[in-house]
Amino acid sequence: MSDSHKDYLIIVQCHLVKERCSGFHCEKAFHDRSGGFLPYERCNDLRLLTMTCGGCCGRSLQRKLINLLHLSHKRDQIDRSRMVVHLSTCITKESHHGPVCPHLDYLKALIARLDLDIAEDTWISKTAEQRRQQGVYPVKPT
Ligand code: SF4
Ligand code: SF4
């Protein structure tokens, strides 16, 4: 799948997980065009913005995105059709950070009502993928 018509990527990350995560791997996946960013393999001139959901239940995401839509259009005439919101892997998949976000459908609904396209996943950890396939989450303390 080519997503070359998108040139403004927004990563939405779990607010709780971001209390202890710098977001390095999300940025690395974007830089390397790996994981959820594989479709942009051939796209060089991309803008990237990251934000958190704002905390459970994610309701403040709507006003953050409205602010972004307003400013990006006002300052740079960027239309929402050029944007796509990537929900970070710590929201969409179980990992050592915890289970899938219990408000995932709500977050998607908030994004969809602003007519923004949604994509799932950012960084895909090989170890976490293996663990998911082996069904070892939640990891028990030893
Ligand atoms: S996907 Fe990984 S790097 Fe990105 S915010 Fe979540 S825990 Fe951090
Ligand atoms: S709503 Fe989901 S993504 Fe946001 S802080 Fe709560 S668990 Fe994390």
Image (tube, grey):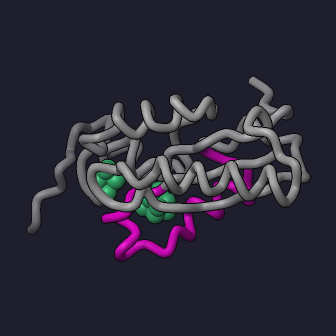
Quarter the C terminus occupies:
bottom left
Residue situated in front as seen by the camera: 95 or 9:
9
| Residue shown at 62% from the left, 34% from the top | 116
* Total labels drawn: 0
**Vertical placement of residue 37 versus 11, above or below:** above
| Residue shown at 59% from the left, 49% from the top | 66
| Residue shown at 50% from the left, 53% from the top | 63
| 62 relative to 72 in the view: left or right | left
Residue 95 shows up from this direction: no
Q: Image quarter for residue 106?
A: top left
Q: Where is residue 102 in the image (x, y as percent from the top left)?
A: 24, 41
Q: Image quarter for residue 27?
A: bottom right
Residue 69 shows up from this direction: yes
Residue 139 is covered by the magenta coloring: no
**Vertical placement of residue 114 versus 45, above or below:** above
Q: Image quarter for residue 67?
A: bottom right
**Vertical placement of residue 96 versus 114, above or below:** below
Quarter the N terminus occupies:
top right
Residue 16 is covered by the magenta coloring: yes
**Vertical placement of residue 100 versus 25, above or below:** above
Q: Where is residue 135 in the image (x, y as percent from the top left)?
A: 22, 38
Q: Magenta residues? A: 13-35
| Residue shown at 81% from the left, 55% from the top | 74
User: As drawn, which residue projects farthest toward the top?
Assistant: 1
Q: Where is residue 58 in the image (x, y as percent from the top left)?
A: 35, 50
